[in-house]
Image: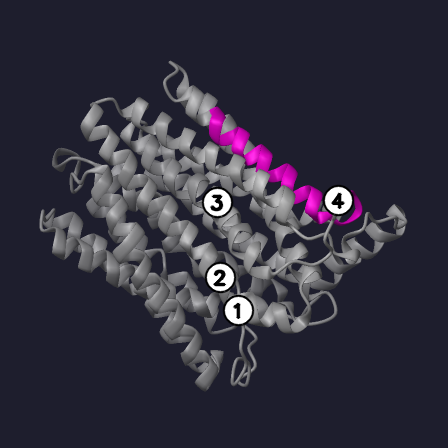
Amino acid sequence: MIKKQKRNPWLWVPSLYVAEGLPYVMVMTVSVIMYKRLDISNTDIALYTSWLYLPWIIKPLWSPVVDLLKTKRSWILLMQFLIGAGLAGVAFTVPADNFFKYTLAFFWLMAFSSATHDIAADGFYMIALDDHQQAWFVGVRTLAYRLAFIGGQGLLVIYAGHLEETTGNIPYAWMITFFILAGLFLVFFIYHLFILPRPKQDAERKEDFKKFFADYFKTFVIFFKRDKILIIIGFILLYRLGEGQISKLATPFLLDGYDKGGLALSTSEVGFIYGTIGWIALALGGILGGFAVAKQGLKFWIWWMLIAINLPDVVYIFLAYTQTSNLYLINACIAIEQFGYGFGFAAFLLYLIYISEGKFKTTHYAIATAFMALGNMIPGMISGWLEDTVGYKLFFILVLISTIPSFVITKFIPLDAEFGKKKETANV
């Protein structure tokens, strides 16, 4: 068999980034829906699923290993195999008596494998394509990643909801859903085994470990020595403080019965809301945010984007107090919130790029995104306990109040007025 150094990127870029997005959405979003349907408390759901952010937080610490050992192609294949094994493990253990701790263990396997897959896939993309191809396919990889979200928190959740309704057996419905995903990752593994190219730059590395790690840790020192670093870190941690709480409790709120203060939606209805209407609004907000910054710069828009990511949280207060059953109104409210989040998150990602500029921008961006994940994990961990203590109505009010510190610290962050103008920036 001829081992091709190059292949048409259309053969592997879309499939690689669908495979990158699916495990993330399963670990971060679908796990919450599944546990809620299996009657796990909001306190436990928020606490334990928030811990699953940890691999993405500490990802920069083991990224050198992916560079030093074997090839990125080998890491991609190994991680896809392990992700598939994790999905199968969830499927096998969902019907068990102690399903919560067993499935969490397999979600941990998926989380670490997915975070490592991110490192390898993004690195492989940069060495397998030349500069022109990287620029041309960046939109393709972003779309593929987002399609994984539609498939994961949309179509698959709708399918799981359909099985719940037709079989009347909730554990069985989720077992079948995860078996399908495990089969899909077996297909990804086999397909990429034959299709992924073998670029010369992806040869096994033979660097001096001592020198490599010395240089690597030097980049950490440089990052933490930058001007106003404590304000920068504070801004990263606080910018999504409200969203970090909402992201863990929004779905349980939609699924909980009226007697518990929720909206009593079905699993399929939640899948439709977030996988179609919500995703479209999120994408439109992100696109508009990028266009806005490109025209007038990040500093001009930062305050409006801060408002956009936080103020729409008021729709949850409205829904909690009205407990409306009108699906059109519910969809409209979620669309408003998701659009605001997409618009506001564009500013956040661009600021992470801004503070990462320089010789070590790859590592510095990884550090910045690690703090971003930490800013989501910590508020997410306590959000379930808080809601169980005060109820949905007061919880959503407190979430809105908790966004005030992000407005205060934004006044002090360093930001060049020209940054973002007439520049094209893309992220997955």
Magenta region, residue range: 67-89
Secondary structure mostly taken by the magenta-highlighted segment of the chain: helix
Look at label 1 and name its amino acid.
Answer: Ala
Question: Disc 1 to disc 2, how far (Cα)?
Answer: 8 Å
User: Magenta includes 75?
Assistant: yes
Residue under label 3, please give it: 24
Residue nearest the observer in this picture, 251 or 136? 136
Dot 4 or dot 2: first in sequence order is: 4
Dot 4 or dot 1: first in sequence order is: 4
- Mark 1 touching mark 2, by CB under 8 A? yes
SS at circle 2: helix
Q: Position of residue 132 (x, y in %)?
A: 64, 74
Dot 1 or dot 2: first in sequence order is: 2
Q: Quadrant of the N terminus?
A: top right
Residue under label 4, please give it: 65
Determine the residue positioned at 30% across, 32% down: 36
SS at circle 3: helix
Confirm whether residue 58 shows in the render.
no
**Which residue ends up furthest to the top in the rendered image?**
97
Residue under label 1, please give it: 426
SS at circle 4: helix
Look at label 3 and name its amino acid.
Answer: Tyr
Is 37 situated above or below 340? Answer: above
Look at label 4 and name its amino acid.
Answer: Val
Q: Is residue 260 left or right of residue 14?
A: left
Question: Disc 4 to disc 3, how far (Cα)?
Answer: 21 Å
Question: Disc 3 to disc 2, how far (Cα)?
Answer: 14 Å
Determine the residue positioned at 88% across, 48% down: 206
